[in-house]
Amino acid sequence: MLSSLRRPSILPGFGFAFGITLAYLGLIVLLPLSALVLRASGLGVSGLWAIATEPRVLAALKVSFGLALAAATVNAVFGTIVAWVLVRYEFPGRRLLDAAVDLPFALPTAVAGIALASIYAPNGWVGSLVAPLGWKIAFTPLGIAIALVFVGLPFIVRTIQPVLLDLESDVEEAAATLGASRLRTLLQVVLPVLVPAILTGFALAFARGVGEYGSVIFIAGNLPFVSEIAPLLIVVKLEGFDYTGATAIATLMLGAAFLVLLAVNLIQAVARRRLGNV
Amino acid sequence: MSEIILDRQHAPDLGLAAKARAKIRTRRATPVTQDGPWLRAILVTLAAAFLLFFLVLPLVAVFYEALRGGIATYFAALTEPDALSAIQLTLTVAAIAVPMNVLFGIAAAWAIAKFDFKGKSFLVTLIDLPFSVSPVVAGLIYVLLFGAQGLFGPFLQAHHIQVIFAIPGIVLATVFVTFPYVARELIPLMESQGTLDEEVALTLGASGWTTFWRVTLPNIKWALLYGVLLCNARAMGEFGAVSVVSGHIRGYTNTMPLHVEILYNEYNIQAAFAVASLLALLALVTLATKTLLEIYFGENLGGKARRQ
């Protein structure tokens, strides 16, 4: 039956490798995820809605989604600049900075979390600088946003970099020949080509930010209705043996993750058709 | 341009030819596509400041806080029994989870990259799925499956098997979050390499296994190492998913990141940062090896895919 679905090949081992892949994928990913969906379907749409609109849940979802959006926006701006500088300019320390971009991928989230909390706490390196101004960063939503900027940055930079590397300079030369200033060339010729990559990176950073837990909880303060994120609320509900509540929030977040994944695929499909890259 | 070409043709020795090439290079630099010095300076400063402030500062803080109370307290925090058992558990979990995902990654890449079949892109999307699931949700799904109130809970209890709040649960959660790393490094590379090498080996009479061991594996070894590196870093550092399934039992189900959390919440700040510094060191070693692999074997790492 399998052979009718695939093109013939003289290479052996398809059945074996494909079988392992499906079995492993099914056991580790699909079965557990369907346990969640099964449990959520027992709630029904109205049950899900009732939990999602509980004031504390709604507040946590707002904090998670709103701050992830804000952090992804900051990263979209600075990530684009970082990618441009790393690809187009030659300067001492470039390779080191390029390697540093991956730090949030490599550094365990809990480690990043306690480090950020200590820096931005009122007696920390940055916290003590802004404290005289009456500002507080750690244990407020601003602290959460900073942690989300930290974890999201590599997604944007690493999505834009390959597109910039592939970019031919002929359109820029044409723009310059036609009398456009360098700034105008950058904003009206280069930037539009980068938009699909920026949007893709933005979506990935946003999705990561919504689900982020480890690097956030130490700096967040975790005050219900103010600085409590949705993943933490899942943990809180689990610790109170409220499996239904935890399942409902998790299902909403999983749904959001699917939507983002869909959006990314859509952006890339459109970009491929219109620009032939990404 | 033509003058330079003439120069090159009549160049009597290598030295002159090299000079001509250097001349070409300077001539071919296109100033119109280069940003002005001011824009350059501003952007480089902005990018460097942003990276140093947001990424490097936290890393520095980890080591500063860890060593603040002196070397003796630093090592005392690392050699204390609970810390040692956390280190041991983290190593054990990684030693199980990483090989599992390596085997899966190679099998999946073999099936996906070397064969053409329907539903391939859907399969790839499914493999990428764990990347877009929140770590906490990843832990929760195993609780719903194997926890006391879970789907298989009654069965497991009847047979006195504990998965949640025990090591099997930690391993499962870790396997889930590190699931795609190896596969997604290998798939694009093996797709770009095609099947010609293997077909030649088979035609010359090699068996399937011999072909895999002697032809395919040497072709993908650097990308495999790259994937293992990233997979291992995530496996040892995973916090959210493991935190949900572990139950935080000191000396038994505490991994290093969980131990960091407990110490920190007990205001044992220096000990927390001491254990955290080990994880930060692991991250630095991972980054350094990764960068070296990209510099020396960049073309063997599967092009764009090496940028996660």
Image (spheres, coloured by chain):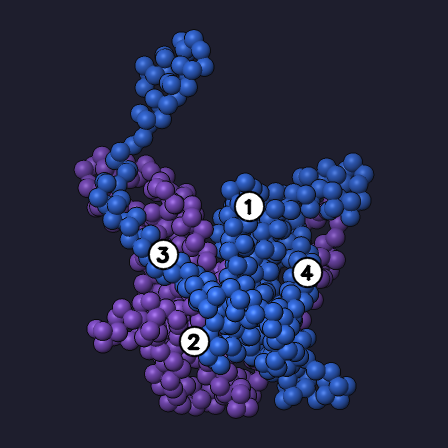
Chain colours: A purple, B blue
Of the numbered discs in the image, which one, if any, rests on residue A6? none
Question: Where is mark 2, residue-wise?
Answer: A218
Q: Is residue A260 visible?
A: no
Amino acid at circle 4: Pro
Chain holding disc 1: B
Which of the two discs, 1 and 3, labels the residue nearer the N terminus?
Answer: 3
Q: Earlier in the sequence, mark 3 or mark 4?
A: 3
SS at mark 1 in the image: helix
Query: CA gap, disc 3 to disc 2?
Result: 21 Å
- Residue drawn at point x = 22 percent, y = 73 percent: A132
Q: Which amino acid lies under the numbered mark 1 shown in the image of this protein?
A: Leu
Q: Is disc 3 in the same subunit as disc 2?
A: no
Q: Same chain for the residues at labels 3 and 4, yes or no? A: yes
Secondary structure of the residue carrying numbered label 4: helix
The three-letter code of the residue at mark 2 reads Phe
- Mark 1 vs mark 4, CA separation in Å: 20 Å
Q: Are there few (<14), some (14-19), or many (20+) residues within 10 Å of tag 3?
A: some
Q: Which residue is mark 3?
A: B52
